[in-house]
Amino acid sequence: MLSVPDATLRDDDHPSEPVDPASEISLAEALASGGIIVDVRAPLEFAADRIPGALSVPLFSDRERAVVGTLFRHMGQGDARDWGDVQVRARLEPFVAELRKALQLPEVTPQARTLRRPRIICCARGGERSAAVTTLLRGLGHPVQRLTGGYRSFRALIRERLTELPVPTPVLLDGLTGCGKTAVLRAVSELRPRQVIDLEGLAQHRSSLLGDVGLDPAPQKYFESELVAAVDRLRGPWTLIEAESRRIGDREIPADLFRQMRAAPRIELRATLTQRIELLRDDYLGSGGEAAIAAVADRIGALAAYPRIGPSGVERLRTQLAAGEIDAVVGVLLAEHYDPRYRHGERKAPPIAVIDRKSVTETAEWLVERLDLHAVDCGGAASID
């Protein structure tokens, strides 16, 4: 009989009955084994962050999890458990089928059978949800294991790792907004995929007032998990990172990495005003049509607080957007917002090299060639001509 767990996010989210030690696996063992991990938390929990490679097969929907939590708080654990039990039993067969598919389990298997790769069930804290699913599948003859400590054990590991993120010889790619740094950085990553950290790509944000237009920014926890994974993949004598402020939208760069970035030498990329206007127009509006224009018109409302633009300036920009005068609006944003902010925060140390942007491919090849020829240390002692 399936005992449906309490799905609230309580600190005492632990199984009410002892669990067979053979059905448990630690995070270290799980990560080293290359096992298949199925996360049975609700979709919103999974979206906020998850163990890399984990698959989502939620025991409860977001709505069901909220109801169970409400029942637990107001009616007690028994009523919450009973209600949840009814919900899961109503769809038990398709739920088990989805679990089998995600875990790559055969329809029938002897209890004693072992699998070359562990099959692992994960919930928030290694508590009742994962215990219930593990018990269910083991009862059907599948030797699955529950992740001890659940997602929280992974989150604790990430938090520890964030305190020290050693990056091999970081070099910053800097330049005014719209000069195409991100496109060049990503072209470099195609040439040297293990020598680039794409912070904006990890954050899913362009790190500007309009940075989230047309994008779905990553939650902070997910950004941090992906950043640790990106640092772990690094190999090579240098690492190229786009120059950023401490925050990329609402995502905050960890203190240790930001310290390394502030001490790193930088290469400045330059582009003409025409190039910059064209690039920003394509980035923010692209083929988004009226929806993209409406999103931009909404975002620039924040500029009413800036003396250089003010409320009247915002209204003029919105009027121009509505009239299709996109390039004129972008030009004003560059001249009156982006460029002054860049120069206000510009580093005192001069760049170790300046390059005028050509094609994305040519610029990326130039960077790789120069960085390969000259080992640039964090103190900027070496130079790139």
Image (cartoon, helix red, strand yellow):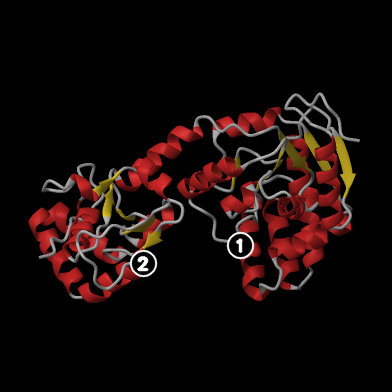
Viewer-nearest residue: 2 or 311: 2
- Total marks shown come to 2
From the viewer's perspective, tell me whether residue 147 is left or right of residue 112.
right
Residue drawn 30% across and 70% down? 106
Q: Name the spot of residue 291 as percent of width and height, x first.
A: 62, 72
Judging by the rendered image, the residue that carries numbered circle 1 is: 298
Q: Name the spot of residue 281 as percent of width and height, x first.
A: 76, 64
Q: Of label 2 and label 1, which has the lower sequence position?
A: 2
Can I make out residue 126 in this image? Answer: no
Q: Name the spot of residue 275 as percent of width and height, x first.
A: 86, 58
Q: Secondary structure at mark 2?
A: loop
Viewer-nearest residue: 365 or 11: 365
Which corner quadrant holds the C terminus?
Answer: top right
* Dot 1 amino acid type: Asp
Q: Secondary structure at mark 1?
A: helix
Viewer-nearest residue: 209 or 115: 115
* Dot 2 amino acid type: Gln
